[in-house]
Image: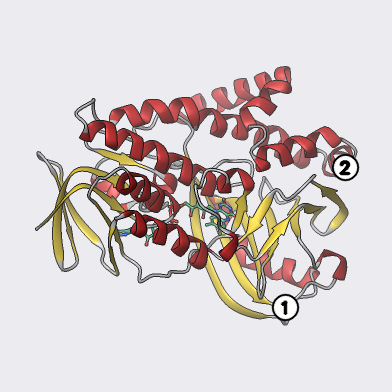
Amino acid sequence: MGTFDAIVVGAGPAGSTTARELAASGARVLVVDRAEWPRYKACGGGVPLRAERMLPFPIDSVVEDSVSRIEMSARGKMAFTKRSRGPFARMVMRDRFDMLLLEHAQHAGAELRTGTVVRDLDLNGRVRIRADGFEAEAETLICADGAHSPVGRMAGLGGDLAECAAWEVEVRGRPRDASVEEATTLIDLGYDPWGYAWLFPKAKLLSIGIVLPREEAGRMKALVERYLERLGLRDAEVEIARGHKIRFRRGGETLAGERVALAGDSAGLADEFTAEGISYAIHSGRLAARAALRALAGEGDLRSYQDELEDEIQPELDAARAIAYMFYGMLKRARRPWMLASEYTPFLWSSLFAVQRGESSYAREAKRAGPLTAVANARLRRRDQQQSH
Ligand SMILES: Cc1cc2nc3c(=O)[nH]c(=O)nc-3n(C[C@H](O)[C@H](O)[C@H](O)COP(=O)(O)OP(=O)(O)OC[C@H]3O[C@@H](n4cnc5c(N)ncnc54)[C@H](O)[C@@H]3O)c2cc1C
């Protein structure tokens, strides 16, 4: 049986960041992933600049495009374009991006086992895992096993997180409107009760998808078909089409025990305004590694990870949820006036771009909208209470 200081299950951005930071500090780390790598991950592949800034190495080798323009529309109508001063996101294909992050973990000294599923967990004493073909034990376990989080569930962590559904197609082609060909992301709003479709440009492909509430999952494929049609891409070659859920932590759920912690999507660390999760995966991976290093040094246990997460990440998720409530709520009630108001409210876009570039935060921007945010939070609290009864 292999013996390690830490086992990390899942080699996506959360797991590889945890593993890299642990290994770089001298810990013996094993990373286990059920997929053969590089692996496809259903994802728009929009890496906000704030995520890139958290990495201590360049990602240029896997960047397919950098975007500083965004074109908004509502079911193909009322389109307008906004520009950030400088790029606000990098466009990547997740197989290459995630492989780069994992290679850095390996270079730091992490051992890797891919193509093997973790099947069982024993938390009596040291942590033991049983995977296909081998067993291993360690002082600590980080579950970075994605939105379904089978291993996190075995550890009894995560609980009933809120979730939504997303559908992604990778398409070979170019949209009809040549003006959007270069470095522009398209966001199409106006889906009921909330959600949006996107087009993210890549070097050879276009990543096109939709995110909707879980109850609307059955409509995703048809809505993406219609979106493709509107973009003049009905006959374009679809290379991959895949759905996946995205989970949202709204506070309260236990994410860490003495020796085990959840990071990234397994902990529901995606925000409810844009449904993006890569920056939170990297951020939580760093926090998890720090807590594991403290535990290995005999300073407390992994529960301190949850405290740090409540301080550093949860306020962002809460603020993004309040912003989503206001933004999508206005859109639902008054689509046309709200699209017009959005177009002529520069503050909205400068705020969004500043958050994406890592120069501001949702928490800070929500605070600036003080009374509105307070009303949104009060209504969300009431809704949560009603749902919990
Ligand atoms: C359609 C879609 C579009 C998205 N677009 C964006 C976007 O543009 N920008 C953005 O920031 N976010 C986006 N997201 C969210 C983003 O993909 C996630 O937040 C991010 O991948 C989380 O990283 P992670 O490391 O936590 O999990 P993942 O990247 O999901 O990695 C989890 C890993 O765990 C492994 N695993 C699972 N179970 C086991 C097991 N039992 N044993 C061993 N290994 C296991 C899996 O193979 C996988 O490699 C999107 C999500 C979806 C579904």
The x and y percentages for residue 328 are 71, 40
Q: Tell me which numbered mark, 1 or 2, is placed earlier along the sequence.
A: 1
Please name the amino acid that badge 1 sits on.
Answer: Gly
Q: How is the image coloured?
A: secondary structure
Q: Residue at x 35, y 68 (%)?
A: 35
Give 127 or 109, whichever is nearer the viewer.
109
Disc 1 element:
loop
Disc 2 element:
helix
The x and y percentages for residue 5 are 20, 45
Quarter of the image that includes the N terminus: bottom left
Q: Residue at x 29, y 70 (%)?
A: 115
Q: Residue at x 67, y 66 (%)?
A: 224
Q: Is mark 2 within 8 Å of ligand 1?
A: no
Q: Residue at x 87, y 54 (%)?
A: 79
Please name the amino acid that badge 2 sits on.
Answer: Glu
The x and y percentages for residue 92 are 59, 62
Res. 347 in view: yes
Q: How many marks?
A: 2
User: Which of the labelled discs sits on residue 173, or is there none?
Assistant: 1
Q: Residues within 10 Å of mark 2 (few under 14, many from 20)?
A: some
Quarter of the image that includes the C terminus: top left
Position of residue 63 relative to residue 310, above or below, is: below
The x and y percentages for residue 334 are 83, 39
Position of residue 315 relative to residue 214, above or below, is: above
Q: In the picture provided, is 111 more to the left or to the right than 133?
A: right
Give the alpha-carbon distance from disc 1 to disc 2, as whole Å. 29 Å
Q: Mark 2 highlights which residue? A: 343
User: Which of the labelled discs sits on residue 288, or is there none?
Assistant: none
Position of residue 376 relative to residue 48, above or below, is: above
